[in-house]
Amino acid sequence: METHFGAVFKLAGALGAMIVGLCFSGAAEAVPSYARQTGVACQGCHTVFPELTPFGRSFKLNGYQIDNLPQVQGMRSPQDYDLLLNQTPPLSFMFQTSYTKTKTALPDSQSPADNAQNGQVLFPQQASLFYAGRIAPGLGAFVQITYDSEAGNVHWDNTDIRYAKQVAGLQDPLTWGITLNNNPTVQDAWNSTPAWQTPFDQKTSAAPVPGAATQIDGTLAGRGVAGLTAYAWWRNSIYGELGLYRSAPQGVGGTAGSGPLDSASGGVLTNWAPYWRLAYEHQWDKNSLMVGAYGMTSKISPASFGGPPPTTIVPVGSATDKFTDTALDAQYQFIGDQHIFSLQTTYIKEKQNLDGSFGLGLSQNASNDLKTYRLGGSWYYERNYGAGLGYFSTSGSSDNVLYAPTSVNGFANGSPNSNGWIGELDYVPWQNVKILLQYTAYQKFNGASTNYDGNGRNAKDNNTTYLLAWFAF
Amino acid sequence: MKSKLAISLSVSAAVFSLVAPAQAQDAARVAAQVCSSCHGPRGDSISPGFPKIGGQRADYLEAQLKAFRDRTRADPMAQAYMWGMTSQLSDDMIKQLAAFYSGQKPPKGKTGDPKLVQAGKSIFEGGIPQAKVPPCSTCHGANAEGNAGFPRLAGQHAEYLVKQLVLFKSSQRAGGNAVLMHNISTEMSFDQMESVAAFLASK
C-alpha cells in the first residue's frame, strides 16, 4: 500500500510541477489596457514588457489609478466620487505562439523505446484575456484568464486586485495599500521576485523543466492559493508588506463539491501562511537599485488522496509539513534613451520540516533544505533589439523517496540539484510585440549531468531551443 | 538678483492666491498622485528623462500643458507621456497645476565639468555671434530664472536641456515659442549645446 501511496504522491508531485509550469508559465504584466487608460505609451511603465520602470512600479503600487479617459462617474459630494469607470472597459488580449525543440527527442509516452516528435508548435501557447485598469477610486485590478493549449483548457491566471491610497499632507509621499492576489510575489513591483523575474519570466511549456522548486517559487501558486496582504511605500523608496495566504485551488472540492477542502485534495495549506516583503530602492540619474528580502512560512498537508482502497486517506491537518522560505533579491536598472540595462537576482532558501511526509513514508528524511539562486541580465538597444543572459541553480538535500526515478521527469540519485544557463535574443518591432529566441542549457538536471532519470537521459538532452512570438493588444 | 527672485516669487504667490483653496488642494492631489511619478514629489525629478518643474514659471507651465493637451507640442516624449496625461485636464486644472509647481522650491544646481561650465557661461551671457546665437540671458533672465513665457533653465537636468535643443534644431519640438528656439539653435553645434546645458544645470 505504501508503495502505491508513494507512487501516487510522486505522480501528484509531477502533476503539481506541471500545473506550476502551465498555470504560471508566462509572466504577462504587459497590458495595453493600462496604456489605453493612462494615455501613456508602453515605454512609460516598461523598459521592454514585462519589466517595470520606476514609473510602472509607482503606477502598480498606487493601485493602477492614473486615468486619462472620459469617465462614467457618480459623486456623493464634490470631489468624493463613488463611481469612476472608464467609458471604455480596460480589456486587453494576449496571444503567444511558440516553437520548442529539445536537443534530444523525448521518449514516446506510449512506447518508451521510440521517440516523440521533436519540434513542438504551440498555437497558441497561451492566449489571455485581461481586465487591467481602475475599478473604482483607489481600487484597481490586474486580472488574467488564460487559455492554455497544452492543458487544452481555460484557467484562472495571475490576479491582483488592490486598493491604494496616498496619505495627504505629508512632506514625503507615503502610499499604503492592500492587495488580493493568487500568487505570492505577483503583487510585487520589482522583477527580481519569482512571479516576474526576467529573463526567466517566459519559458516554453513543451519541454522538461527541473522538478524541484521552493514553495514561494511558484509551487504554492500552482496549487491554488489566495492571499490578502497590506503594504506601505514611503518616499518611493522603502517598501514593506505583510500578509496571509490560504489554499484556494480551482476545480477541487470536498463533500460540498466546491469546498471545504478535505482529504480529496492534495497539498492543502493547513494554516494562514504568512508572507512578508521588505525592499529599499534608491534612484539616481537614470539608475535605480533595489535590495530586498521576502519570505513565507507555509504548513502543508503532505498528501491527501481519496478514492477506493487501497489508497491512504490523510485528513487535512492530520499530518503537516512546514516550509520556511527566506529570500534575498536585488535589481539594478539603467534606463537611457538608447541603451537599457537591467540585472535581477534572487536567492531563496527553504527549510523543510517534513514531519508529516516522513511519518507517512513519503520522504526519506524528516527535514531537508532546498536553495534556488538565479541571476539574470538584459540589454536593449532603443527598446528594439535586446539580449539576455541568466544563470539558475537549485540545490538541496538528497532524498531518495521525495526525489525518485522516473523517465525524463525523475531523479535517479535522489538529488534535487539542477543548474544551467539561459540565453535570449529579443526583437521588439513595436512596443506591444516581442519575438524572442531563447536557448536553455542544463549542466545538471534533477540531480545529475548524465543518466539523471535512471533511464539513460542526460541533462544536456533537455537543452531547449524556444522561439516565441508574443502579441499584446 | 534677489529683487527679481522676490518679484518672481511674489508673482507666483499672487497667482497661487487667485486659486480657491479647494481647487489648490485638488491640484496638489493630482500632482502627488500623477505628476510626481515622473517629476518627483515637489517637481524635483531624479531621472534626466523628465524635467524638473518645481519653481518653473507658471505661465510657461500653463502654455506647455495646453500644448500637450492640444497636441501642438509633438516631440517623441510628449507623445509617449504627456499627450495622454493632459488629455482630460481642464483649463482650470492646468492653471492650478502650473501655480502649484511654480510655487515649489526651484531645483539646486549640480556641479559640472568646470571647462564645460565655463564655455557654457560664455554662451549664456554672450551668445555665439558667428552662429547667430544671442545670449540666452536675454530671454531667460540673467540668472536663468525665466521670464514671463520663457522658462526657468537654472538647475535643470543638462541632458534634458541638450535633448530639447536638439529637438528645437530639428523642429521636432514645435509650436508656441519653439520657432524662436529653432532659429537660435540651428547653427549650434552639439558641443555648444552640451556646454550651455552644463552651465545651466550647475546654477
Image (cartoon, coloured by chain):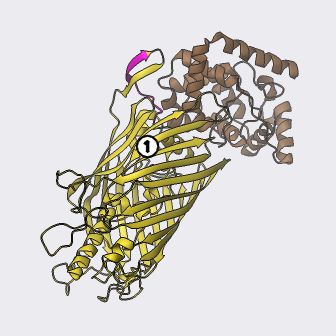
Chain colours: A yellow, B brown
> Foreground residue, A31 or A5?
A5
Which quadrant of the figure has residue A447? bottom left
Q: Is residue A275 left or right of residue B92?
A: left
Residue that protrudes farthest toward the left in the picture = A308
> Foreground residue, A441 or B117?
A441
- In the image, residue A167 sits, relative to residue B189, either above or below, namely above
Inspect this view and state whether residue A397 appears: yes
What percent of the width, then of the height, locates residue A256? 17, 50
Tag 1 secondary structure: strand
Q: Is residue B9 left or right of residue A335?
A: right
What percent of the width, then of the height, locates residue A191? 50, 55
User: How many residues crowd around disc 1 within 10 Å: few (fewer than 14), some, or many (20 or more)?
Assistant: many
What percent of the width, then of the height, locates residue A326? 52, 63
Q: Which residue is mark 1?
A: A179
In the image, residue B190 lies in the stretch drawn in magenta:
no
Inspect this view and state whether residue A44 appears: no
Q: Residue at x 67, y 42 (%)?
A: B46
Q: Which residues are magenta?
A: A64-76
Quarter occupied by the N terminus of chain A: bottom left
- In the image, residue B163 sits, relative to residue A396, either above or below, namely above
| Residue type at the position of mark 1 | Thr
What percent of the width, then of the height, locates residue B202? 81, 39
